[in-house]
Image: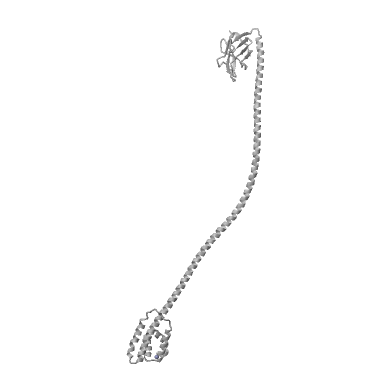
């Protein structure tokens, strides 16, 4: 192996990582005091010496340690030559230095790697933290955005409702005004109607009263008229009866039969002849308005014969005249009974007066 080929091996030799055979060849040159090799190995050590020192101990490869021990143990063989002894000691020192440098280098490299890894880790941590922060911020922003969107929508809706409500309010106000006007008009109309109604009511009451008064007056007039008519009829009847009575009384064959001896009972006279009879009396009992007196001829044989109806005057006096022909020989008495207003064909009550003709 030439020195040119060995140029690339001195640093590896100094680091102690050179293959055993190659390392042994450089060892051989150093043992033979090869100035070229001594110089280059020294430079390699100097180069290694500029590397940073280390405090941590690092385990070197087992082969390096063995080689270092071996190189130290070989030195006594050449103890005869002090140069070889110095070279051996130098080799030992160089081995220790190499070990130390190697350890320092390894530690340094490891520390650098560790530093690099730590820096990477820190950067990653920071990046992760940033990322997390960014994500959290994004989430927060997203939430804020959602909240704002909701709020905006609510406000929009509220604004729309407000607009609608305002429109409704205006409309309601107009309707209210219209209704108020209509109500006021109706109030006036109602008040007027009420006044009219009151006036009409008063007029109606007045007219009703007047009508009732007129009606009562008319009724009274009618009653009076009826009474007058009745009185007139009675007077005419009385007049006729009196004429007939006078006619009968003036006949020469007329019999006069008195009845009732006391003033407190019905009393009077019967005038009788074949052309008729007259009954004149006083103190007649009071008659109900729906009743009448009926006069009967009581024959010797057979049922009573109805002659006529009459009512007494308010004073209790009475006159009855009949112009019918009478067979006086066949009549034993005359009688008077109280009968229904229209009269009866036969007596329905016990006579109040019987005048025997015997
Ligand atoms: Zn050499």
Residue at the extreme bottom: 81
Position of residue 192 in the picture relative to residue 58 (left or right) = right
On the image, which quarter does residue 260 sit in? top right
Q: Position of residue 288 (x, y in %)?
A: 58, 19
Determine if residue 89 is in view: yes
Quadrant including the C terminus: top right
Q: Quadrant of ligand 1?
A: bottom left
Residue at the extreme front: 55
On the image, which quarter does residue 298 sit in? top right
Q: Nearer the viewer, residue 255 or 209?
A: 209
Name the residue at 64% across, 39% down. Answer: 194
Q: Position of residue 351 (x, y in %)?
A: 56, 14
Name the residue at 42% across, 86% down. Answer: 46
Q: Nearer the viewer, residue 73 or 242?
A: 73
Establish if 26 lies above or below 219.
below
Quadrant including the N terminus: bottom left
Establish if 315 lies above or below 103.
above
Establish if 2 lies above or below 316.
below
Determine if residue 2 is in view: no
Establish if 334 lies above or below 151.
above
Q: Position of residue 39 (x, y in %)?
A: 41, 90
Name the residue at 64% across, 44% down. Answer: 184
Q: Coloured how?
A: one colour
Position of residue 206 in the picture relative to residue 53 (left or right) = right
Name the residue at 56% across, 58% down. Answer: 155
The tally of labels here is 0
């Amino acid at each position: 192996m030439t020195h040119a080929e060995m140029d690339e091996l001195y640093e590896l030799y100094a680091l102690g990582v050179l293959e055993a055979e190659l390392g042994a060849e450089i060892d051989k040159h150093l043992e033979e005091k090869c100035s070229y090799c001594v110089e280059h190995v020294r430079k390699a050590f100097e180069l290694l010496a500029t590397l940073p020192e280390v405090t941590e101990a690092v385990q070197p490869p087992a082969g390096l340690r063995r080689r270092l021990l071996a190189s130290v143990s070989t030195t006594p063989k050449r103890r005869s030559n002090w140069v070889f002894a110095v070279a051996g000691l130098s080799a030992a020192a160089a081995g220790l230095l190499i070990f130390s440098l190697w350890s320092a280098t390894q530690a340094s490299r490891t520390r650098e790697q560790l530093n690099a890894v730590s820096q990477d880790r820190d950067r990653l941590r920071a990046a992760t933290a940033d990322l997390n922060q960014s994500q959290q911020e994004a989430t927060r922003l997203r939430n804020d955005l959602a909240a704002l969107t909701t709020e905006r929508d609510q406000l929009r809706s509220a604004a729309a409702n407000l607009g609608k409500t305002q429109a409704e309010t205006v409309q309601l106000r107009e309707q209210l005004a219209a209704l108020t006007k209509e109500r006021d008009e109706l109030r006036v109309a109602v008040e007027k109607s009420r006044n009219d109604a009151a006036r009409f009511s008063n007029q109606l009451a007045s007219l009703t009263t007047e009508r009732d008064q007129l009606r009562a007056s008319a009724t009274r007039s009618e009653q009076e008229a009826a009474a007058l008519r009745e009185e007139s009829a009675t007077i005419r009847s009385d007049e006729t009866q009196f004429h007939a009575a006078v006619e009968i009384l003036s006949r020469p064959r007329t019999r006069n039969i008195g009845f009732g001896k006391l003033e407190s009972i019905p009393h009077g006279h019967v005038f009788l002849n074949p052309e008729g009879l007259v009954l004149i009396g006083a103190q007649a009992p009071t008659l109900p308005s729906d009743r009448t007196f009926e006069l009967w001829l009581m024959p010797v044989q057979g049922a009573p014969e109805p002659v006529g109806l009459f009512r007494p005057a308010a004073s209790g006096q009475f006159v009855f005249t009949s112009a019918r022909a009478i067979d006086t020989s066949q009549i034993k008495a005359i009688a008077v009974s109280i009968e229904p207003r229209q009269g009866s064909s036969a007596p329905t009550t016990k006579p109040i007066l019987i005048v025997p003709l015997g």
